[in-house]
């Protein structure tokens, strides 16, 4: 745990921010799709494919715990505003080598629900409706996965960025989206985002997000437990200090029997670069040098512990293992099992 030490507050760096024929489906396929197809949607195969995706959840077991990854959707980030310590041409060359878009980074948002049998603990709350329109799908996918918002007992925020925290409240009514939940956040993170006059201290491109973050956190203050790294959130579940991306960023370590799981938050921001180029700096990291150091330490811990690793911005569902590859790392996705 000594490798995960707290850091002084820093202000943000500038953040720029099977095709199908039109023939009728088989009777069996038509029946299956019709169960979730809106009445207004044609049963024509191509119409369905263009209108909606499959339900976004993925479930597996960790010892006695049941883990469900629930998609909040996706985000688009210009590549030109992504990496800060490497020339853009070098970044695009790497992206081209992995057959990725060289202009726009497509990022998934994977929230993690840990069902211990006694409690249901959600790690992060998605972005709600005031961020990018391609996100904010957590509540819908949560319900499709078999849970209701009222089932959530605890919500742990890895940090207070929009795609992790703005989904705490209904942003039209300001009412909690998870009315029975108690909230957990690092005390350092809470103090940073709720301080007076923060808007004047951060770069202009991100000032607009400060009031929304404050207006999300302050109404839930009475139900929020401000914790420290190392604190137990529930039996077998503790907070890890992974500050760097934000001043009080935490990851979550869950252990059941011989199995362990690391929910990394935004320690990993790219499904390939964060493993093959762990020292690259991301413009969204408030302390990029510390964030790179923490990224290496957390990936090393995942390798050493053979822990299941969850990446919030990894390709859905963002679950797998990390292994060493020379001086860097490789990502091994968990096998999708239909049963």
Image (cartoon, rainbow, N blue to C red):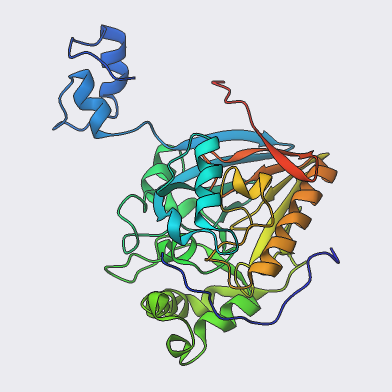
Residue under the point 50% across and 52% down = 89
**Is 136 in front, or is 207?**
207
Q: Quadrant of the N terminus?
A: bottom right
Image quarter of the C terminus: top right
Place of residue 230 in the rendered image (x, y in percent of width and height, measured from the top left): 78, 66
- The mark total stands at 0
Q: Which image quarter: residue 68?
A: top right
Instruction: Give the percent coordinates (x, y) of residue 328.
Output: 75, 45
Name which residue lies at 85% across and 45% down. Answer: 304
Relative to 329, 205 lies left or right: left
Give x and y (percent) for residue 63.
74, 37
- Residue located farthest toward the top when viewing the structure as drawn: 26
Name above or below for residue 198 compared with residue 182.
below
Q: Residue at x 53, y 44 (%)?
A: 93
Name the residue rendered at 75%, 55% in the picture.
296
Q: Is residue 110 visible?
A: no
* Observer-nearest of 48 and 294: 294
Residue 172 at what x, y percent from top left? 27, 68
The answer to which quarter of the image holds residue 227 is bottom right
> Compared with residue 127, is residue 186 higher up or lower down, i.e. above or below?
below
Rendered view: 57 above or below 232: above
């Amino acid at each position: 745990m000594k490798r995960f030490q707290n850091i002084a507050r820093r202000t943000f760096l500038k953040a720029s921010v099977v095709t199908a024929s039109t023939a009728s489906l088989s009777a069996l396929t038509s029946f299956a799709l019709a169960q979730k197809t809106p009445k207004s949607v044609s049963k024509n195969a191509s119409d369905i494919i263009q209108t909606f995706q499959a339900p976004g959840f993925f479930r597996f077991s960790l010892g006695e715990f049941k883990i469900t990854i629930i998609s909040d959707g996706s985000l688009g980030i210009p590549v030109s505003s992504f990496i800060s310590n490497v020339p853009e041409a070098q970044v695009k060359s790497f992206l081209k080598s992995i057959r990725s878009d060289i202009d726009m980074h497509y990022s998934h948002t994977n929230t993690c629900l840990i069902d211990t049998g006694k409690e249901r603990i959600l790690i992060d709350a998605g972005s709600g409706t005031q961020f990018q329109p391609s996100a904010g799908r957590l509540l819908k996918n949560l319900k499709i996965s078999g849970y209701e918002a009222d089932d959530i007992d605890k919500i742990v925020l890895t940090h207070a960025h929009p795609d992790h925290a703005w989904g705490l409240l209904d942003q039209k009514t300001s009412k909690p989206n998870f009315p029975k939940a108690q909230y957990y956040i690092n005390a350092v993170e809470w103090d940073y985002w709720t301080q007076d006059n923060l808007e004047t201290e951060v770069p202009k491109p991100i000032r607009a997000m400060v009031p929304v973050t404050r207006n999300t956190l302050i109404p839930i203050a009475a139900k929020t437990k401000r914790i420290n790294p190392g604190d137990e959130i529930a039996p077998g579940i503790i907070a890890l200090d992974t500050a760097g991306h934000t001043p009080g960023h935490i990851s979550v370590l869950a252990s059941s029997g011989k199995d362990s799981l690391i929910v990394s938050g935004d320690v990993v921001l790219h499904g390939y670069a964060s493993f093959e180029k762990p020292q690259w700096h991301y413009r969204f990291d408030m302390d990029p040098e510390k964030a790179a150091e923490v990224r290496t330490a957390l990936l090393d811990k995942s390798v050493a512990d053979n822990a299941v690793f969850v990446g919030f911005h990894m390709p859905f569902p963002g679950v797998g293992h990390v292994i060493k590859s020379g001086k860097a790392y490789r990502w091994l996705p968990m096998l999708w099992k239909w049963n």
